[in-house]
Every structure is written in structure tokens, then in C-alpha cells.
Image (cartoon, rainbow, N blue to C red):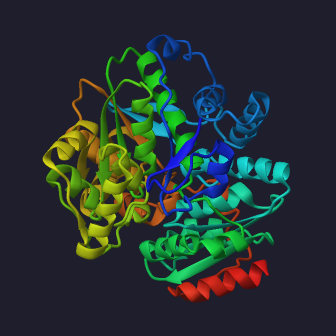
Amino acid sequence: MRYISTRGGIQPISFKDAVMMGLASDGGLLLPQSYPTISREQLEGWRSLSYPELAFEVISRYVDDIPAAELKDIIDRSYATFSHPQVTPVVKQDGLYILELFHGVTLAFKDVALQFLGNLFEYILVERNQKLNIIGATSGDTGSAAIHGVRGKKGISIFILHPHGKTSAVQALQMTTVTDANVHNIAVHGTFDDCQDMVKALFGDLEFKEKYSLGAVNSINWARVLAQVAYYFFAWLRVTDSGEQTVSFSVPTGNFGDIFAGYVAKRMGLPIDKLLLATNENNILTRFINQGDYSLGEVVATVSPSMDIQIASNFERYLFHLFGDNPERLKNAFVELKEQGRISCHENEMAQVRRDFCSASVNQAETIATIRDFHAQTGYLLDPHTAVGVKAALDLLAADSARVCLATAHPAKFGETVEKALGTPVPLPESVLELKGKPTRCEIMAADLEKVREFVVAQVG
């Protein structure tokens, strides 16, 4: 399996090189040259597999430069850190299936990918006798999951930028209470998009990237998306075991990585009926799917902050396929976005978009009402991001299909919002209670690329 860039400017590379490159050296995102297909017979043969066994079956089809036994060990160690024996269990509540992705160390779906990626980085670095400086941007969950994925690991330092005061209190604590010498938190006066733009600029400076051995941990890293593909297969197998015939997924969406993993699963042959992209008021992707309007707006701060994003990095991967795997068409689209603040698509392209996805935008009042009403009906607590997906599923997906809603975070991570919805405090897991009163370490700075660059150099230096 070889990997290419959406911008067409690199020669095909191996899986391990793709992991270490992160963002392609031509500024594009890496994708496999082709997608392996899984037959229905093979799929049926996976029903009895545990989550790590299933993850190995999916991931190994994209990896041909790590021996199978060693890849299996990396995967097994990654999911041994989860608190639930099924890793990503599926529970049924009031006619909906909830795919619980929050049983990892930081109580968010990002752990599924970042425990794997942290172990993968360490394996490759030891093998190559190299060091890596990870630079990442987060709206909350990616940062804490990435930090916990690499803390204390040999040969790795990590720098995480987050918008100051715009993550939840628990997210901030999960990041800033990690005081390992190889962990550096940077709180930026600005938005997530400001953080992401600076990270992309550092990776776009190829001389700086090479000199300081930069690596990516955001979902621009293909290994992150790949790890997430596995839980679509896992959920589909569990739901159809219950006698369901058709299965649709509702995915609360910010940076497009999670739903792109579902798109990959479907391209591999997983019989997904609909992929529902659920957004909050930052609904550029919903406007695009429903109206063909991909035009930039201002970021709105909401009760689902991990989705408060305008430019979804992983959307480039989908656009590459939408444009017939044509890097020139893709590059022209991003020139148009830079110059005119929008991307235009042809009618036949928009028809394909609507075959691939449906979409709904859920506002904050609806989000809070969904948390309240769903709890009243079922006793089950939703975090605000999951509530966005649940509301969208109830509105758009037919009840005669199995509706799987991705639960992307434990409700305690956004306790203030859940408490507002219910009128009572949210019980905190022991892992969160232990953070209270711990020492923290964090650098607060302006959204200034040069100041961030100087800080990285000073720490690495």
C-alpha cells in the first residue's frame, strides 16, 4: 500500500513514511492510492472478533511495512488502556443506537486514534533512531488525547495549541495537568482556526519542518483517520447482530475526520445506508451539502466547542475524491477559497455529495433541549456534541433503519452545559475528580506565528 498527496506533488510513499510525514510536503493531505474492499463473506467472518482483533483486520489492510505480529502488539497495547472490555460498546436507547467512543483515558473519541498513533510513533522512532516534535492544534479533545497518547514516550516532544478560555474546564485540566517534560501546552488568544492556521504554516515551512523534525497528530495524519474506520465496522456488526437490516450513522462533525472515516468504511464495502453529517451553528458543511454553499463565515462560540470550526482540514480528502482524484482541480478550488472565500462545485459534483452524505444543523437551544429530553425519556446522559448528532438523527433518519449516533465524549467533559440542561450537577468520573488541584503548566500567548515558532525553538533547542 502506497500513499499519495491530494495536491499531487510527491511520489507515492510507504505507510510508515506517511505516518511520519503527517501533512504532505506539498501542503496536501495523504491518502492511500486505493481502498481495499471487504466482501460480505469476509465481513460476516468478523462477527466474533474482539475490538482489537477487528481493528487489526481493518488497519492491516493499509499497512504492509510493519510485520503483522508487531502491528498486532501495537494495536493490543493501544486498546488495553480503555475502561470498557468492548472498547467502543454500542447501547440502545429509545430507538437509537449510541456508539460510545468515550471509554479511553481522556473520555473522548480521539483516544481511539491517538493511543494507537502514540504507540505507532514510538515504534517507528525507535526503529529509525529518530526524534519527533509533534505540533498540533485542538478545540479541546484532540489535545488532551494526543498528550496522553505520547506523554513520557521516548524520542517525542509535543506542542499543543488551543484557544485560550474556549475549551471546557475538564478539557483544559486534562491538557494542562500533564507536566511531563516532553509536553508543552500553548493557550492562544484566538480561535481554533487561528491555532490550526499557525500549525499548518509551521508545517508549510519545509526548512523549519525538516530542521526541527515536526510531526502531526491532528486528524491530518492519515493514521488517525485509519484507526477510526474500525469502529464503524465494529458498530455495524453489533447492530446487525440484533437483526437490523439497514444501518445509518449520525456523526457530530467539526474537522471532518470522524465522518471521513465512515466514508472510507463505506468505500471499503461496509453497507452503510446514510452518513449524516451533524453540525452546530458553525454549519459551513451543512450549507455545502444542502445548498452547495461552501463560503466562509465567522466562528460562533457554542456549547459544543469541539465543533466550532469553519475550515475543516479533512474535507480536503473528500474534495480530492469528489473532484475525480484530480489534484489540479483541488488546488484551483483552494485558490478560489483564498481569493473569494468560497468553493464552487458543478451540478454533477453536488449530486455526488448528496449521494454520499445528508446533513443537518442543530442550534444551541435544540442541543440543550435534546440533552434534557433524552435524559427524561431514557435516563441516559448525552454530552452536547453527541446531542447534536442525536437531534439530527431524530430529524433526518428514518426510524425503520438502525440509527447509530456516535457519542464522541463523556458528558462530564462538558458538565456545565449538561448541568444547564438538567438543572443538576453531572456526576464526575474518578479520573476527572483526580485532576482537581493538580499543578498545571501552560504558556499563554497571542495568535502570533513567530512567537509560537520562537517558543518551539527554545524548547527543542
210 in relation to 54, above or below? below
Residue name at image x 43 percent, y 54 percent: 314
Residue name at image x 41 percent, y 59 percent: 418
Residue 414 screen position, x and y as percent: 47, 61
Residue 420 screen position, x and y as percent: 37, 64
How many marks the image carries: the answer is 0
Screen quadrant of the N terminus: top right
97 in relation to 240, above or below? below
Residue 252 in view, yes or no: no
Residue name at image x 70 percent, y 52 percent: 118
Residue name at image x 39 percent, y 55 percent: 316
Residue 254 in view, yes or no: yes
Screen quadrant of the C terminus: bottom right
Asked if residue 360 lies left or right of residue 34, the reply is left
Residue 192 screen position, x and y as percent: 45, 72
Nearest to the observer: residue 72 or residue 250? 72
Asked if residue 417 lies left or right of residue 121, the reply is left
Residue 106 screen position, x and y as percent: 62, 55
Nearest to the observer: residue 405 or residue 377? 405
Asked if residue 84 lies left or right of residue 235, the reply is right
